[in-house]
Image: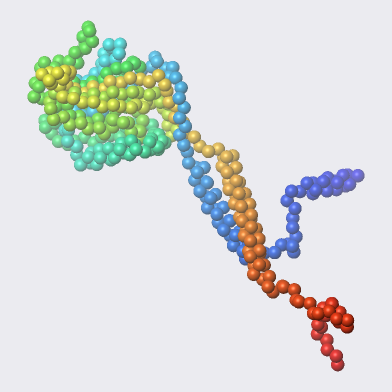
Amino acid sequence: MRRLTKKKALTLVKELDAFPKVPESYVESTASGGTVSLIAFTLMAVLAFLEFFVYRNTWMRYEYEVDRDFTSKLRINVDITVAMRCQYIGADVLDLAETMVASDGLKYEPVNFELSPHQKIWHMTLLHIQERLRVEHSLQDVLFKSAIKGAPPVIPHSEDNSASFSACRIHGHLYVNKVAGNFHITVGKSIPHPRGHAHLAALVSHDSYNFSHRIDHLSFGEMIPGIINPLDGTEKVSVDSNHMFQYFLTIVPTKLNTYKVLADTHQYSVTERERVINHAAGSHGVSGIFMKYDISSLMVKVTEQHMPLWQFLVRLCGIIGGIFSTTGMLHGMVGFAVDIVCCRFQMGIYKPLKEAPVNGQESSATTIPTDSHPQ
């Protein structure tokens, strides 16, 4: 009974076979079929190889949500070189609530405004990258992928005598309230004031004013080497001593989550404006560098994503099965068309013979000659 049950089960399974086997004696191999098979296998291998590179590649996914974090502090990372001596200028932040932020985290370092040959090469490279970023926005995804955590690269110092330094490099970081504010560099050191703050500019001669500057780095949030910000590499040269440079920044909180780094940083867009201060001509203001920033209420989440393994296998099966079926159909159609064309050309060979005239003694049947002859 068990053997009969097993035989019935095997018979039922055989009847459900969707891939019946054809005996080899019924299969005919042709040169055209072999050529099509070779082309199909080559195309499968090439597309599968390219699909593997697609599987290895990653892309960035952007999501937007409301930023609910309004109690934390905002970090400002600054590295600016101004063409004035350090004792003549001061930098600080005044936010929308009229709160003055001390610049204890900033360092004033005497330097030369002119770059060394090595620094010029780096500066030109940075400007070229900025130019390409304005045109090719997808390059920002590449920068996000290459971002790493760690200390920023060290800028080489000049070996000249400190007495010949005519510029000042202001670098470091500040922690400010997460509200709109104004980071500025102007003449004189800042002092606290009941109604805000003030700068001791009366002791500085107007002849020493020169707010030509170069922004080597300006970012907000966590310091992430590899990310290039819109103002990095900006250089402004002032011909007039009384000159005001204004930068209007819109900061967007950003959560970056890649396979290399997980960080809370900020992106920003900028609009520039500059003018000469001439009170006689009605152009009023204070000479200096002013960066007015505002913080967006939306937050961007940037996540690096990868193709799942199951999706890669499905695409791979689609490539192999699609090419196999398509080449088989094309081969059958071409063969059918060739057979039709060849048969039309060969129709003259198989035309029926004209029948002989019928008489009483002859039969209308056609005799078939044989190879035997009478002895």
**In the image shown, does 207 or 250 lie closer to the viewer?**
250
Say if 345 sits above or below 276 in the image: below
Q: State the residue at coordinates (31%, 24%).
A: 249
Task: Name the residue: 45% across, 30% down.
Answer: 62
Tell me if residue 262 can be seen. no
Give the farthest residue toward the bottom: 375
**Quadrant in the rendering for residue 90:** top left
Looking at the image, which residue sits at the far top?
Answer: 194
> Does residue 1 sit above or below 78 in this rendering?
below
Side of 229 relative to 111 (left or right) = right
Residue shown at 30% from the left, 38% from the top: 131
Which quadrant is home to the C terminus? bottom right
Up/down of 322 relative to 180, above or below: below
User: For this view, does 294 lie left or right of residue 241?
Assistant: right
Give percent across and percent down for residue 318.
60, 46
Tell me if residue 354 can be seen: yes
Q: Which image quadrant for residue 223? A: top left
Residue name at image x 16 percent, y 24 percent: 276
- Specify the color scheme: rainbow
Residue 86 x/y as whole percent: 16, 24
Q: Nearer the viewer, residue 86 or 375?
A: 375
Picture quarter containing residue 38?
Answer: bottom right
Describe residue 89's horizontal placement relative to residue 330 as left or right.
left
The answer to whether 260 appears left or right of 368 in the picture is left
- The residue nearer to you, when weighing 321 against 306, is 321
Quadrant position of the N terminus in the picture: top right
Q: Position of residue 25 (x, y in %)?
A: 74, 64
Residue 75 place in picture, x, y as percent: 33, 22
The mark total stands at 0
